[in-house]
């Protein structure tokens, strides 16, 4: 990310690519397609598995985003959600 997206969860530096990232992305795409609108999907990654955590259609009650975060998510919303809601 170019800048922090939230004051609530500040950027803590780059992290190593998780070993289970491809599995996590596949699960995310499947759930996202079924949901068919914006949703934050939380997962836990273990050395051998990806575990579903929760759905959140309105993360952080829309608060705590930095100006960069507002722009970033706003652009994604316009591109992918648009008139679905």
Image (spheres, helix red, strand yellow):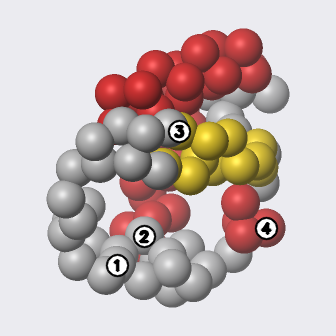
Q: CA distance from mark 3 to mark 4?
A: 26 Å
Q: Name the residue beneath numbered marker 1.
A: 11
Say if 54 sits above or below 85 in the image: below
Give the camera-side residue of 32 and 66: 32
- Look at the numbered discs 2 and 3 and tell me whether their residues touch, using CB distance below 8 Å: no
Of labels 1 and 3, earlier in sequence is: 1
Query: What element does badge 1 sit on?
Result: loop
Of labels 2 and 3, earlier in sequence is: 2
Q: Name the residue beneath numbered marker 2.
A: 5
Badge 1 density bin: few <14, some 14–19, many ≥20, Cα 10 Å: few
The quarter holding residue 25 reads top left
User: What residue is shown at x 76% (from left), y 44% (from top)?
Assistant: 55
Residue 63: horizontal and vertical position, in percent? 69, 75
Say if 4 sits above or below 21 in the image: below
Q: Is residue 28 left or right of residue 62?
A: left
Of labels 2 and 4, earlier in sequence is: 2
């Amino acid at each position: 990310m170019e800048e922090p997206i939230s004051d609530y969860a500040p950027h803590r530096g780059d992290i190593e690519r998780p070993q289970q990232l491809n599995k996590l992305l596949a699960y995310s795409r499947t759930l996202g397609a079924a949901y068919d609108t914006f949703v934050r999907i939380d997962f836990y990654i273990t050395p051998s598995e990806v575990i579903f955590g929760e759905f959140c259609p309105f993360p952080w009650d829309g608060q705590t985003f930095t100006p960069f975060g507002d722009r970033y998510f706003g652009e994604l919303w316009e591109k992918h959600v648009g008139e679905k809601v």
